Image (cartoon, rainbow, N blue to C red):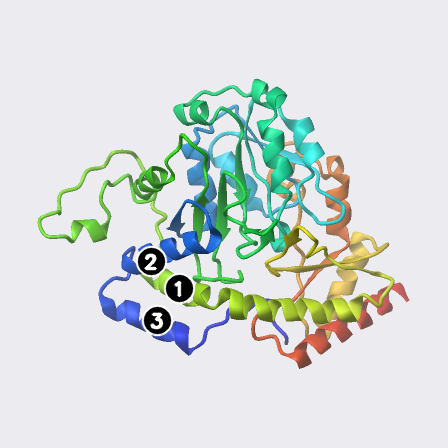
């Protein structure tokens, strides 16, 4: 069975994890701090904090900005549930909008129509690793008539004076927009290093701070180090310094720090990310495109333009003219050929919890259309040329079996 997205664990990663275990630092320590600095240098943003998940990063930022009951947060209907769940955790209202027909990303005209005087945050999602149109999103929330609608209720909201752009960049580390890497494209971006991501730390994530003046991004980093560790004003590394044991709890914080074991994996992954990982994933994309572009029924993903380049995280193939049921039957046939495929994602308004909140997928027709025809093909480091050919053959056979 060809798997969908197994992690790439080689001897170099194993050796670095063993070194971390032997070092005496297995929780947040020197490797985590080094990883944060290297991520900042790689992405070109102003500061970075590493955490145990992207989900934790999104929620910490919403709470830092003071998002609360009655506030509204705009996000695409086409995303994973985590993007919406963190809004619910804060007591705020997820305001879903439709996506683009071509690239799956949030539709900027739909954002504009959804903005009210309760809107505090816009959360674009870089679907499959393809960056959103950040210049136009940033321009929209900075427009005078949009700024005039903004009602600031916290000190951070008053300092920014407008809607915060909080990018769910879970898929897109290493992607580029107009020559700049994700993480440096808007106010704040949050990456995922989950096991299935391009750059994995097993579990994990990071917040890339890029806020404008008068914010001090290093100070925000220091504040969220406290928020992510119970509200404790010193971490274990600081407390271990001679005579520095005494600490205080300055807020009722959370527990979502990254460990040095996780960072050990990330340091190896980041070192070879551009020169090896992305090269390998790009080659897989090219093989899929070369084979499937010849098929009239295949709608290939947008993954590079003159301005934008994907991180090659997912290959979301769409089958033209099929129903959701036919798509499901095609997937079954592919699995019967011992090839694992997936769907990214079931749109959030289709999930039971959100349907019970009153959301209806009928209000997001482009999202549903894309979802109903989408099949994600496997893309992972150790996928061989023979396996790629097997995937392609299985897809073609399955589609022809259903469509004739």
Which numbered disc covers residue 267?
A: 1
Q: Gap in Å between the C-alphas at discs 3 and 1?
A: 9 Å
Q: Say whether residue 113 is visible.
A: yes
Tell which circle, 3 or 1, labels the residue nearer the N-terminal end: 3
Quadrant of the snapshot with the N terminus: bottom right
Quadrant where the C terminus is found in the figure: bottom right
Front disc: 3 or 2: 2
**Which residue is pictured at 37% across the width and 36% down the height?**
216
Distance between mark 3 and mark 2 Cα atoms: 14 Å
Are there few (<14), some (14-19), or many (20+) residues within 10 Å of tag 2? some
Relative depth, front residue between 143 and 373: 143
Residue pointed to by mark 2? 34
Q: How many marks?
A: 3
Asked if the residue under mark 1 is in contact with the one under mark 3, i.e. CB atoms within 8 Å, the reply is yes
Q: Are marks 2 and 1 in contact (CB under 8 Å)?
A: yes
The answer to which quarter of the image holds residue 298 is bottom right
Instruction: State the residue at coordinates (25%, 70%).
Output: 22
**Real-space Cα distance between discs 2 and 1?**
8 Å
Q: Position of residue 65 (x, y in %)?
A: 44, 31
Q: Position of residue 155 (x, y in %)?
A: 39, 23
Q: Which residue is mark 3?
A: 16
Q: Horizontally, is 357 left or right of 236 in the view? A: right
């Amino acid at each position: 069975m060809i798997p969908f997205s197994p992690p790439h664990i080689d001897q170099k990663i194993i050796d670095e994890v063993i070194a971390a275990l032997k070092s005496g630092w297995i929780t947040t320590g020197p490797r985590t701090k080094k990883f944060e600095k290297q991520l900042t240098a790689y992405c070109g943003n102003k500061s970075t904090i590493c955490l145990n998940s992207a989900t934790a990063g999104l929620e910490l930022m919403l709470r830092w900005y003071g998002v609360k009951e009655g506030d509204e947060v705009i996000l695409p209907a086409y995303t994973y549930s985590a993007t919406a769940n963190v809004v619910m955790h804060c007591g705020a209202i997820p305001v879903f909008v439709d996506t683009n027909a071509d690239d799956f990303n949030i539709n900027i005209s739909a954002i504009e129509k959804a903005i009210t005087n309760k809107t505090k945050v816009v959360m674009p999602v870089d679907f499959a690793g393809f960056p959103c149109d950040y210049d136009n999103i940033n321009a929209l929330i900075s427009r005078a008539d949009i700024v005039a609608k903004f009602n600031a209720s916290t000190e951070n909201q008053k300092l920014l004076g407008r809607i915060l752009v909080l990018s769910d960049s879970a898929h897109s580390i290493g992607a580029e927009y107009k020559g700049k890497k994700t993480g440096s494209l808007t106010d704040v971006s949050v990456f995922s290093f989950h096991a299935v991501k391009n750059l994995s730390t097993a579990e994990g994530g990071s917040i890339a701070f890029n806020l404008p003046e008068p914010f001090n991004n290093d100070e925000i980093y220091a504040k969220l180090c406290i928020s992510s560790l119970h509200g404790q004003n010193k971490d274990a590394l600081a407390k271990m310094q001679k005579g520095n044991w005494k600490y205080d709890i300055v807020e009722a914080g959370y527990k979502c720090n990254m460990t040095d074991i996780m960072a050990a994996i990330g340091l190896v992954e980041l070192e070879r990310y551009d020169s090896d990982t992305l090269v390998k994933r790009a080659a897989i994309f090219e093989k899929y495109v070369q084979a499937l572009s010849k098929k009239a029924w295949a709608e290939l993903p947008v993954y590079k333009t003159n301005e934008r380049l994907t991180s090659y995280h997912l290959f979301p193939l769409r089958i033209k003219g099929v129903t959701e049921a036919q798509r499901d039957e095609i997937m079954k046939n592919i699995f019967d050929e011992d090839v694992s495929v997936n769907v990214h994602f079931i749109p959030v308004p289709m999930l039971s919890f959100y349907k019970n909140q009153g959301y209806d997928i009928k209000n997001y027709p482009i999202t549903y259309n894309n979802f109903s025809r989408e099949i994600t093909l496997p893309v992972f480091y150790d996928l061989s040329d023979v396996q790629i050919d097997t995937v392609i053959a299985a897809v073609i056979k399955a589609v022809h079996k259903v469509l004739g």
